[in-house]
Image (cartoon, rainbow, N blue to C red):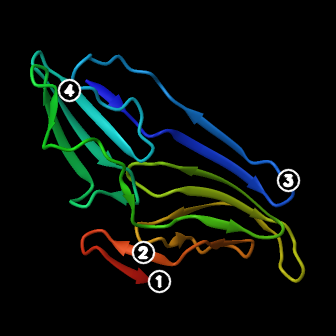
Amino acid sequence: MVVIKPKVKSMFLTQEFDEDAEEMHTRLKRMPTTCRYPLRSEDSEILCKIYPSKVVCNQTCMFGYKFKEGRTRIMKCRFDEDAWTPTRTFEDCEQFVDCTLSLGPGGSMKCYTNFMEHGPICEVECKHYEDKSAVPRKSYQCDEKGKWSPSLPFCVTPSSALYEDPAAGEVAIQ
């Protein structure tokens, strides 16, 4: 079995520095010469079972992403035909919830993203700013509707209030 996971990303941002640090880790996999599948994916996990005559891949979108037909897609390819069925290529998943944050004055945060089963987790700390008291470092997590818990401190704000219900395909303002 071959497992291809989204790149693990961690970012550290602070309002006091101009530099953003981003770490990405990838692994190379062996691949047959026919029925080729992606070596990496930005927004999904791909699990492929290689049999003597075929490859069967299960592509699952990570948290907050989906295909038109849902979060999971099964693709099959016979080595003698070298064609994936159903007849489509591996596609990127589409984002349906925005969990991005904007950092304000006096704030610093480190976020961990690209989880399969839950939303991003950000460690946020706010320094004393104007009439606002300092807020010690604490972890915050985004849910499937783009809501953060616990409530975000004054030095960060959600970047969007847009949420698309993946089942209904409808966009709602939060």
Front residue of 88 and 48: 88
Q: Are marks 3 and 4 in contact (CB under 8 Å)?
A: no
Image point 28% across, 73% down: which residue? 169
Please tell me how crowded label 2 is: few (under 14), some (14-19), or many (20+) other residues with Cα within 10 Å: many
Q: Which residue is mark 3?
A: 17
Circle 2: residue type = Tyr
Horizontal arrangement in the rendering, residue 44 relative to residue 59 (left or right): right
**Which residue matches tag 2?**
163
Residue 134 appears in view: yes
Label 1: few (<14), some or many (≥20) within 10 Å? few
Task: Say which amino acid is labelled 4.
Answer: Lys
Callout 4: SS: strand
Which quadrant of the figure contains the N terminus?
top left
* Vertical side of 157 occupied by 119: above or below: above
Marked residue nearer the N-terminal end (3 or 4): 3
The residue wearing badge 1 is: 174
Query: In percent of the image, x 75 and y 62: which residue is there?
Result: 125
Quarter of the image for residue 122 reads bottom right
Instruction: Point out the tag, 2 or 1, that comes first from the N-terminus.
Output: 2
- Point out residue 119 in the picture as x, y percentages from the top left corner: 47, 58
Specify which label sits upstream in the sequence, 2 or 3: 3
Relative to 108, residue 162 above or below: below
- The answer to which of 136 and 96 lies nearer the viewer is 96
Whether label 1 touches label 4, CB < 8 Å: no
Q: Position of residue 24 (x, y in %)?
A: 58, 36
Residue 100 percent location from the top left of the image:
57, 64
How many residues crowd around disc 3 within 10 Å: few (fewer than 14), some, or many (20 or more)? few
What is the spatial separation of the Cα atoms under label 1 and label 3, in whole angstroms? 32 Å
**Which residue, given by chain and number where applicable, does mark 4 sit on?**
49
Task: Label 1, secondary structure: give it.
Answer: loop
The amino acid type found where label 3 is placed reads Phe
